[in-house]
Amino acid sequence: MGWMLLILVLFWTVMLIILPQLYMFDLSFHPNLPPPEMGGPKDHHTLENYKYLVFGAPGNEDGYNKVDLLVFVRTLIAAAFVTVIDLMLCYPIAYFLGQTKGGGFIRILVLLLIIPYWINEILRAFAFRIIFGDSGVINEFLILFSVIDSPIDFIRANVALYAGLGYAYILLMIFPMYNVIESLDRNQIEAARDMGASWVTIHRRVVIPYAKPGIASGCTMVFMLSAGALAAPQILGGPSSLWFTQLVYQWFNTGSNWTQASSYAIVLLGACLVIVLTVMRLFKVNMGDIGK
Amino acid sequence: MSSGVSVDLQDMWIKFGDFVAVREANVNIKGGDFFSFLGPSGCGKTTILRAVSGFLEPSDGNILIGGENMIGKGPNERPTALIFQNLALFPLMKVWENIAFSMEVRGASAGERRKRADELLDMIALSDQGDKLPSELSGGQKQRVAIARALCAEPDVLLLDEPLSALDLKLRQHMRTELREIQKRVGITFIYITHDQGEALTMSDSVAVMKAGIIDQIADGKSIYDDPSTAFVASFVGENNCFRGKISKIIDGQAVIDSNRTGALRGRIATGAQGKLSVGDDAMMFIRPEGLSLTDKEASDTRIMAEVHHSEFEGQSYNVFLEGTEGKEMKMALTNRGEAQLFDAGSNLKISFDANQAVIVPVGELASE
């Protein structure tokens, strides 16, 4: 029974994830040709697509493809920012959930966290647009209580985008941490308290080291998914802020340039992997811990 | 190292909603004593310990440590250190970091901490184990690390919550001796929680026996065993034969109880029960199995007739299970002096006891097995 399940999962991983990625990887090293000419005499391996991302179109006077590179770096930084915000927001929640006894209350809390996710992502993004809009709930309230005179443009300031992205992955941050913290022996916290440790020390020396696998697991997922998000940036992003995935989407869709799109997608994937693995190395988290 | 700090509980009540976990506890623990709370699980002894350590506020009453009232002070503000039942060592810290954690909290340098941890490791005979993780140690070693960690904070009072219960029998007996030795060496007050009477009697200067939130008796181990104040203490600590009857006579601290089952029996009124019993009261008399012996005496108020049910040979002693009139069950333990004789089931024996070893207390609830 167990090995059958393993084969199924393996089939799924290989056929539906790894092979298409490998195909894309190969595609990214080809020139963009109409389908009949693919594999024909004009087809060859080339670095053109990657060169384009770095240096722009041939004859580019700037020397570098500043627009796309800027979007690329900004996307990664923004995704890291969303991850950090989610971590700071979710750690207290996960700690509270994990260390509070008394099932009923906790179950209601978890339910309240989960239920909003029954609504689809695009609807949720539009809901955020309404909440943060010029005549949205937040602006209306602030004006009603005379905190501000004219509405703040949360969309342009990207507040809506960060809020939307942060909220979209909150569960993926909470649950891995909650799982680990729940198994932490309460006596360890009390022992530390008995020995005079402050709350900060207790978390720094006892809870966080113990919860590290959960934290790593949550952060990895939130970072990867934020960097790869499309709907939220599309709907909530300000006019001047483009997400790198939007560029990929444009190449695939409006640009009909699959080879160029593949190279962009591969660069994003590679960069995310490098960042995640580096951070894991820095914080001494093993790959095996993630599965805990 | 500081020593000899007293702990006093004054009229302390602890309630959880309607449930009274501890009822009017009054305990005076002398500085430097090894004091045990002994009782079955759920009797409130751990609750008392949590109140002394500061994890729990009593609903009423005071807790004094070294004469100073501790009410309103958190666990980190009290001169106590608690050793948890499951030890609660930090699994991700090395042994020496565990031991010196209380110094780390106070901001001591790594060098100082390591030095102190090594001293304590020497004391608990684990000199070279400081760089291991707790999971790499055996049960008894972890035990000693937990003690060292608690002592590192230089507490005035060390609180131990059944720390030996997870160990196997042999190690447990060894750790009893070791704990007692450590206590004598450091000279601080130990408060020990246990449901194991052997632990309480062997290690303690004083024992408080608890039942359902009430402290029945506080005394040294010998008095608890030989002179119990209540039926519960008599039946919970060690084995005892219980005889129930009505008091017909009281003379010079002794009393005679009459029962249909065994006739008139004479015993000594327990020190803790004196003045509480008068002629006509129902009472219970307890005689230890080793307090019974064979006799040729003619009928008297210290003699019982009984029939042998079965006997067991235990090496140093042999136990005879007896049935008195109307099915009254008794156990007699005879010391084996080489002439051990196993009695046939059904044979009739004359059993006698010393009236001073038969303790009479008011009728009360017995400890359930």
Image (cartoon, coloured by chain):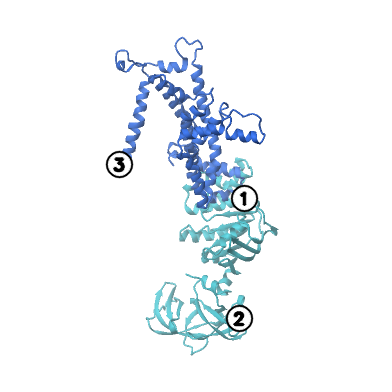
Q: In this figure, what is the number of numbered marks?
A: 3
| Residue A187 x/y as whole percent | 54, 51
**Label 2 lies in what chain?**
B
At a point 49% along the width and 54% down the height, the residue shown is B140
Chain A, chosen colour in render = blue
Q: What kind of element bears circle 3?
A: helix
Q: Chain B appears what colour?
A: cyan
* For marks 1 and 2 on the same chain, the one whose residue lies earlier in the sequence: 1
Give, as a three-letter code, the residue at label 2: Leu
Counting other residues with Cα less than 10 Å from the Cα at mark 2, is it few (<14), some (14-19), or many (20 or more)? some
Numbered tag placed on residue A4 in the rendering: 3
Q: Position of residue A65 (x, y in %)?
A: 49, 16
| Alpha carbon distance from label 3 to label 1 | 55 Å
Residue B365: x percent and y percent? 53, 73
List the residue tagged with mark 1.
B153
Amino acid type, residue under disc 1 in the picture: Ala
